[in-house]
Image (tube, helix red, strand yellow):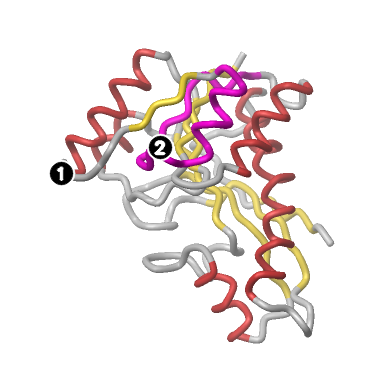
Amino acid sequence: MLRIAVLASGSGTDLQAILDACETGQIDGQVVIVISNKEDAHALKRAREYEAKAVFIDHRGMSREAHEWRITEELDAMNIDLIVLAGYLRMFTNYIIDEYKNKIINIHPALLPKYGGKGMHGMNVHQAVLDSGDSESGCSVHFVTEGVDEGPVIARMHVPVKPDDTPKTLQERVLKAEHLLLPMVVQWFAQGKVYPENFKIIDMPQS
């Protein structure tokens, strides 16, 4: 059984998709710990309801390295196989990336490498897609490296951009795709189908 850690800063809907997939057997694994840098993050409440360990680690007043040391202390104690960043709004240094090399993945609400990087999160991403006039958007799951959204992409799922879309309606459509794609990729890890030395982008259309 894959031992999964999820890091989230907000409501945790992507976390919930993983929890549900573990419960139904879609994922051969278990979320054993959820960590947030926000004490009031709803993701922590979801973790407690699932009976996973829920940990708040405040980043304020700490160096990035000191904060990551606290995170790795929790992860090491739980013998984690995979770390999933699901709406976690902190960038990692090489300290934790090297400690868990090729074991940290992130979900991004766009078709990387487009609309990634500094400042490209939340509604900013969807507004950028609409401003570009693109006919499609989607989400991507990628390995985490020190560069923001620069890690190798594992899989992407596409959704259409509609003529009357607003950033909110596009966000809702992309979020539905995230809830399908992320558990699927986590299960690939559980099955040993994701190989660090052989990265491939798998595009998965979703209307």
| Residue at 62 percent of width and 44 percent of height | 13
Q: Residue 94: x percent and y percent?
A: 26, 42
Q: Is-magenta flag for residue 78? A: no
Q: Residue 86: x percent and y percent?
A: 52, 44
What's the amino acid at mark 2?
Ser
Question: Which residue was labeled with disc 2?
Answer: 36
| Residue at 44 percent of width and 51 percent of height | 151
Q: Residues within 10 Å of mark 2 (few under 14, many from 20)?
A: many
Classify mark 2: helix, strand or loop: strand
- The span shown in magenta is 29-51
Q: Residues within 10 Å of mark 1 (few under 14, many from 20)?
A: few
The image quadrant where one finds the C terminus is bottom right
Question: Which residue was labeled with disc 1?
Answer: 61
| Residue at 67 percent of width and 23 percent of height | 191
Q: Residue 17: x percent and y percent?
A: 68, 37
Residue 206 is drawn in which quadrant? bottom right
Classify mark 1: helix, strand or loop: loop
Q: Residue 31: x percent and y percent?
A: 57, 23
Would residue 95 be found to the left or right of residue 77 on screen?
Answer: left
Work out whether 165 lies above or below 21. Answer: below
Q: Nearer the viewer, residue 142 or 171?
A: 171
Q: Nearer the viewer, residue 166 or 196?
A: 166
The image quadrant where one finds the N terminus is top right
Q: Answer with mark 1 or mark 2, whichever residue precedes in sequence.
A: 2
Q: Nearer the viewer, residue 9 or 150?
A: 9
Q: Residue furthest front?
A: 40
Work out whether 120 lies above or below 24. Answer: below
| Residue at 72 percent of width and 73 percent of height | 136
